[in-house]
Amino acid sequence: MWQQLSLRARINLLLVLVLALGLAINVTRLVLEAGPRVQAEDQSVIRLAREFLETIVAEIDEAPDPEARLNQIVRDLNRLRHVSITRQGSAVDGSAGTDRAGDAGRSAPAWFVALVHPDKTAVNVPISIKGRPGSFVITSHPNDEVAEIWDGIVTQLLVGSGVAIVLFLITSMVVGRALKPIEALSRAITKIESGSYDTRVKPEGSPELAAICEKLNHLAAALGAAVDDKRRLAERVVSLQDAERKEIARELHDEFGPYLFALRAHAGALTKIADAGEPNLGALRKHGNAILEQVDALQQSNRRVLERLRPVGLAELGLREALGALLRLWGESHPGVVVEAAISPSLGETGETVDLTIYRIIQEALTNVFRHADASRVSVTVEPAEAETARGTLGCARVRVSDDGRGLKADHKLGLGLTGMRERILALGGSLDVVSRESGVTIEALIPRGAAC
């Protein structure tokens, strides 16, 4: 049940328990001190009465009528509230006329009297008048003292309860105001959970809560930015996919279409020659060679399209061999450009997705170099690297492609290829930097080898 209570209810309940415990301890202390206090009062009153009697009795022998004088003194002493005096062996009972009605208006409950003063204290004082022995019995009546203690306890209960209630209300109000930002935080978190990333919380309350509000606002802004980036990335992916489909469709139309038309034409010519009575062997050889040339051209075009869709030999040969074949192909097709490669053998297993990403980055970078850079030298480096992140140090693959070409213009924007590569690397948790100098361009990418960089 304690776990089901809110923080405010827990604080209020603890405050009530502390205040009640403090009040109970104080009242218990008064009750425990009441018995010794009443006993001390009894002893004090009896001692004073005994000394007074002994002094008076010493002077009574000189009175004309000692007996009458003594009885009068007893009656006078019994008007006191805290003590009663009786003379043994006398017809006059000094306590008979004692009026203690004054105690009735402020008397303590019987159970309390029995608790703090269970037995009345009585002392026998022997006397001698004109040689005749006698005695007085002094009995204490600490009713006023008990009533005073009881009044103190009642007052303590009333005042303590009032103070406790006031303290509870004040503390509850202060706690409520202090916890108000937590309620706002809870509502904001609920809204953020439902997708309202523009939700913000006003920093208020204690410095700690204000700091939490600020961090929640930053978190909401970061989540909103991440969602926007994800949406833009998804749109970009769809756009790139459409662009790639259009490019493939254009190649199929521009390259496959003419070849297929030529094949159809040559096949039709062969059919006509075959239908002739005496086939022309030279014409058959001519059309057959043309068909072989068209088929060879179709195979080359098909290889280029497949290369764009999926690198040939990457899964079968591995990344190192596939990159070697790619670099040799570019070197053979552009003999005027020196292609230098440094592929570290300590790169280790990187996974199919990372291998394909590394291959595509190098392929796209080399395509841009040979098309636009007018470079004489290209350097390709693939090596292991480490990146520091919030999760610690993670292993990455560093890919760097540098050329000595003319560099990029100041207002140059990345093309669809590199833009798509950057978004793909960001989706994997890596990074892509393009640095342009007067003497060329350097493309460097960090790609995680299994976890985000």
Image: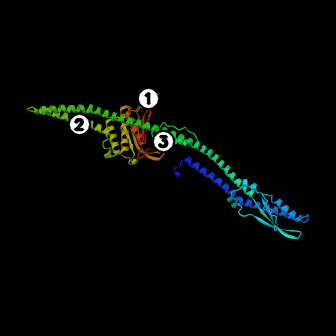
Crowding at mark 1 (Cα within 10 Å: few <14, some 14-19, many 20+): few
Callout 1: helix, strand or loop?
Answer: loop
Q: Does residue 418 show up?
A: no
Q: Which residue is mark 2?
A: 296
Q: Amino acid at mark 1?
A: Asp
N-term mark: 3 or 1? 3
Asked whether 362 or 186 is in front, the reply is 186
Specify the label residue 123 is tagged with. Answer: none
Q: Nearer the viewer, mark 3 or mark 1?
A: 3
Quadrant showing the C terminus: top left
Whole-percent x, y for residue 98 in the image: 78, 59
The answer to which of 86 and 27 lies nearer the viewer is 86
Residue type marked 2:
Asp
Quarter of the figure with residue 86: bottom right
Residue located beneath label 3 in the image: 190
Query: Does residue 334 appear left or right of residue 93 in this picture?
Result: left
How far apart, in angstroms, are the residues tagged by discs 2 and 3?
64 Å
- Point 27% across, 37% down: residue: 302
For label 1, the residue is 411
Q: Nearer the viewer, residue 351 or 87?
A: 87
Question: Quick one: label 1 or label 2, which is nearer the N terminus?
Answer: 2
Marks 1 and 2, how far apart at CA: 42 Å
Q: How many other residues sit within 10 Å of disc 2, few (<14), some (14-19) or many (≥20)? A: few
Q: Disc 3 versus disc 1: distance between alpha carbons?
A: 44 Å
**Amino acid type, residue under disc 3 in the picture:** Thr
Task: For mark 3, give the secondary structure.
Answer: helix
